[in-house]
Image: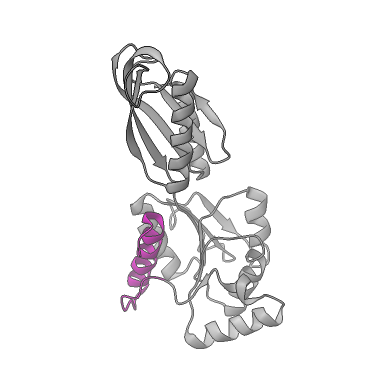
Amino acid sequence: MDRRVLKEAARLADLHDPYVLALIVATEGSAPRRHGGTMLLRSDGTFLGTVGGAQFEEEVKKEMASTLQSHRGALRHFELRGWKPGALPSRCGGSVDVAFQYMPGGPNILVWGAGHTGLALCHVLAELGYDHSIADDRPKLVTQDRFPGAKNRWVVGADELPSRVAKEGARFSHVYLLGYDAAKDEEVLAGLLPGFSGPIGLIASRTKRGLTMKSLEKRGFSRKQLAPIRSPVGIPIGADSPEEIAISIAAEIIRDVRGTE
């Protein structure tokens, strides 16, 4: 495989940016490239690498674009003996099998609240191998000993967190507000909602949820803007303890990642 493609794939994975790989897995007769030829398609539509050029490569690019849109990989056979039925207009004299693989950006979760539930959730996320960051305004709780697997450990106020997220350029897929203060949770929501399109989980009782939503509406947020908020959080499994709630939230994230209902 092309080392440049491998390095770029690793870079995109760190950025949680989806991409598509095309890999020549088998050839027969004469072909533009042999086994191992690779191409990469970024989410912005740009390509890296080559599988051989000409009409064959253009067809591979089309299939890669389709894979990026459908999120579904495939194995395709390309006949390069132009005199055969269904073949590409090529005189190479062989055929090529190409595997197309969609690589999702992967979850990257921001957890606001380093208390019992936040701690339990981060432990579960670490076991799943999911990137995550923890934020809280209590320095004694946001430590490496408590959150060894966190990419970021931010000691920030609720009103400062949205600007910290923007400054760091972190591409979070999910945000979960597991804080200890309803007013601070609302401040985080008010700061994140205008620029964050992913799911935002708010741990709350029915009363807290209702009051928070009404308060945000009074602050000018529309129903559409409030739609990303998930409350109650997690899959409904009757969770009660911090550990059970953490498992239910992790299950919700897994459902999002796998695209299942």
Residues in magenta?
Answer: 234-261
- Residue 97: x %, y % from top left: 31, 26
Image point (65%, 72%), residue name: 187
Q: Is residue 197 visible?
A: yes
> Is residue 240 a member of the stretch shown in magenta?
yes
Q: Nearer the viewer, residue 255 or 22?
A: 22
User: Could you tell whether 176 is left or right of 76 in the image?
Assistant: right
The answer to whether residue 32 shows anywhere in this view is no
Name the side, left or right, on which 69 lies relative to 126: right
**Which quadrant of the view contains residue 235?**
bottom left
Q: How is the image coloured?
A: one colour
Position of residue 248 relative to residue 20, above or below, is below
Across and down, in percent, residue 250 comes to 37, 62
Q: Quadrant of residue 156?
A: bottom right
| Residue at image coords 47%, 26% | 5
Q: Residue at x 38, y 35 (%)?
A: 100
The percent position of residue 122, horizontal first and vertical second, equals 42, 59
